[in-house]
């Protein structure tokens, strides 16, 4: 394999693999793995494995799966949504791009997914609510939110930075927490909010919308995926696929979410892999 061939192959590998091969040592390790793969493949051909029906079927399936994925990528690359289409999509889903700067204090109780802090006792739900209520009263009277978060919050990650959650966007946190983040009055401390993690005191400091320019690339990819998906559906409909109900059973009602193709996702998972804020739980 020449240097040009190796670098062309490298350019077409997944981003995480390219990252691992970003140094001379990483490239050497990749080349060694490729060499080993080629040695094994050569031996497999020598002993006639590709002629075995079960192996030949898997090879054919993986070839067609790769071609299907390559076609989908080409369809996406050729889709060129206009600026007007992208802005219309942005305006239609503007609420999805809301973001807020917020901080919180968490008081866990028995059964919480958050571990007990060192030297802290396990609190019942009633005790945790009472503690959160008392802490809120102290903040309302003028004590510093950040100082209390550092001392009392059971979310040790954000607690170390005064409860700071950074920029919170839609779809990144559990529903009840997200609802509070995007509805609370600015700069007010919430009443204790119960989630599976415990009781939260939340303060929203800023709220706004991510500008169009910052999400334009994501919108382009999304719209290109929709266009490619429509083209795939057209090919599917044209093919007039017929499956035997006597063998496969009666088809279930279509699931729109499941039926929508994922950009770049293989149609069938290969049998053998190629070498190579409170968050939602």
Image: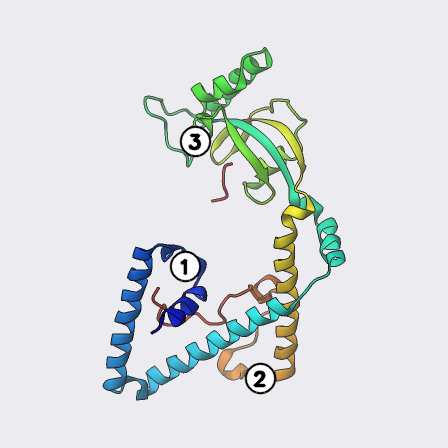
Q: Give how far across and how far down residue 96 sits, in percent.
A: 66, 46
Between the C-alphas of marks 1 and 3, the distance is: 31 Å
Residue at (57% x, 37% y) in the render: 168
Is label 2 in contact with label 1 (beta carbons under 8 Å)? Answer: no
Q: Image height check: is 155 above or below 132?
A: below
* Number of numbered labels in the structure image: 3
Q: Residue at x 41, y 37 (%)?
A: 113
Residue behind mark 2: 242
Question: Closest to the observer: 233 or 22?
Answer: 22
Q: Secondary structure at mark 3?
A: helix
Task: Report x, y in % for residue 182.
Answer: 65, 35
For the residues labelled 3 and 2, say whether their Cβ atoms are less than 8 Å apart: no
State the residue lying farthest toward the top.
141
Q: Say which label, 1 or 3, has the lower sequence index.
A: 1
Q: Callout 3: few (<14), some (14-19), or many (20+) C-alpha neighbours within 10 Å?
A: some
Residue 131 shows up from this direction:
no
Q: Quadrant of the N terminus?
A: bottom left
- CA gap, disc 2 to disc 1? 41 Å
Q: Secondary structure at mark 1?
A: helix
Q: Separation of disc 3 and disc 2 at Cα?
A: 54 Å
Mark sitting earlier along the chain (2/1):
1
Residue at the location (42% across, 76% down)? Answer: 62
Disc 1 marks which residue? Answer: 18
User: Which of the marked residues, 3 or 2, is nearer the chain's N terminus?
Assistant: 3
Residue identified by numbered label 3: 157
Q: Give the residue at x 50% y 43%.
A: 280
Q: Nearer the viewer, residue 115 or 15?
A: 15
Q: Are marks 1 and 3 in contact (CB under 8 Å)?
A: no
Could you say where residue 187 lies in the image, as x and y percent from the top left? 64, 23
């Amino acid at each position: 394999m020449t240097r040009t061939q190796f670098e062309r192959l490298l350019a077409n590998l997944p981003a995480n693999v390219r990252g691992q091969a970003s140094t001379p040592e990483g490239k050497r390790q990749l080349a060694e793995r490729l060499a080993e793969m080629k040695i094994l493949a050569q031996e497999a051909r020598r002993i006639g494995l590709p002629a075995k029906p079960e192996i030949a079927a898997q090879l054919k399936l993986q070839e067609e799966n790769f071609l299907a994925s390559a076609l989908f990528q080409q369809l996406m690359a050729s889709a060129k949504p206009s600026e007007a289409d992208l802005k219309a999509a942005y305006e239609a889903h503007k609420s999805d791009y809301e973001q807020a700067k917020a901080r919180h204090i968490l008081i866990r109780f028995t059964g919480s997914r958050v571990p007990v802090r060192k030297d802290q006792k396990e609190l019942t739900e009633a005790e945790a609510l009472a503690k959160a209520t008392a802490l809120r009263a102290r903040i309302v009277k003028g004590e510093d939110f950040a100082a209390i978060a550092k001392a009392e919050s059971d979310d040790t990650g954000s607690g170390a930075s005064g409860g700071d959650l950074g920029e919170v966007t839609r779809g990144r946190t559990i529903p009840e927490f997200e609802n509070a983040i995007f509805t609370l009055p600015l700069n007010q401390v919430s009443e204790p909010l119960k989630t599976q993690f415990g009781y939260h005191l939340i303060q929203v400091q800023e709220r706004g919308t991510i500008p169009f320019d910052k999400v334009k690339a994501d919108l382009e990819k999304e719209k290109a995926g929709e266009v490619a998906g429509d083209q795939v559906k057209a090919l599917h409909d044209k093919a007039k696929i017929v499956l035997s109900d006597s063998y496969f059973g009666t088809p279930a009602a279509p699931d729109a979410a499941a039926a929508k193709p994922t950009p770049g996702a293989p149609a069938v998972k290969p049998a053998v892999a190629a070498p190579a804020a409170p968050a939602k739980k």
